[in-house]
Image (cartoon, helix red, strand yellow):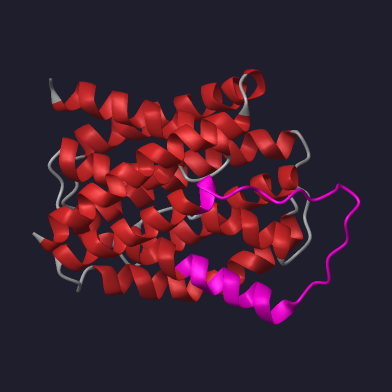
Amino acid sequence: MSALILALVAGAVVGLALGGLGGGGSVLAVPALIYLLGFTPVAATTASLVIVAFTSAAGLSAHARDGHVRWRTGLLFAAAGIGPAMLGGALAGRLPGAVLTMAFALVAGTAALRMLKPRTAVSDGAVHTVRLGRAAAAGAGLGLVTGVLGVGGGFLAVPALVGVLGMRMRAAVGTSLLVITINSLAALALRAGTADGLDWAVVGPFTAAAVLGAWDGKRLAAKLSGRALQRLFAVALLGVACFMLVDAVA
């Protein structure tokens, strides 16, 4: 199968997961780039940032039209992550490929286990006390993960926005896309050197397919059980994480 077809298929799957689940789909981009398309870990994390930035921005526009983005809160949350995201972007180019692969596997495994954990129901009228220190720490941690590993971090951002800032789920999903877009662009700002060597004939179609897939994923989520989709994705992601961990230590 040609690299172009693989890029289109992988991009569509990443987009469907991101659009259908509201976060976590971009975690599949890095392993797809490494194991299907032959990218090095450093190049894969850089390319993933490009894919994540464009796909999140496209999803953000759709959620903004529906009124599900809290701009002020999202910008404040993202501000805490810009510095760590840029630091992580600079640090990633200096880490051995095996270390990046192992770190990514651990983060992906954590994301999968979080998705499999039963979700605690939160009523629409529930009010949470905003803890600025915790919010800043969560934003900084998300930025660092985005910068180093090239993942959007929606699986981290959404729970933080709900649990720490008391947002409703729909608003948290839309606002997380704003945070992810900003963090991805900040990390890319310090990865300009690694971006020059990317195979844009692969990255471009991958990104386009992911953007289109995200739109289809949003429609799919309205027809199918979101919890069932999340569990199926989590099991697949856990398998990918285990494979990458074994590959890193082998």
The relative height of residue 228 versus residue 134 in the rendered view (above or below) is above
The relative height of residue 144 versus residue 20 in the rendered view (above or below) is below
The reply to whether residue 191 is in sight is yes
- Looking at the image, residue 188 sits to the left or right of residue 82; the answer is left
Is residue 24 one of those drawn in magenta? no
Q: In the current view of this chain or complex, which residue is farthest to the bottom? A: 133
- Looking at the image, residue 216 sits to the left or right of residue 196; the answer is right
Question: Where residue 214 appears, x then y in whole percent?
Answer: 51, 30
The relative height of residue 224 versus residue 7 in the rendered view (above or below) is above
| 188, 100: nearer the viewer | 100
- Looking at the image, residue 143 sits to the left or right of residue 219; the answer is left
Question: Where residue 66 appears, x then y in whole percent?
Answer: 76, 34
| Quadrant location, the N terminus | top left
| 211, 225: nearer the viewer | 225
* Residue beneath the point at 45% across and 64% down: 186
* Residue beneath the point at 59% across and 71% down: 138
**Which contiguous range is marked in magenta?**
114-143
The relative height of residue 168 versus residue 85 in the rendered view (above or below) is above
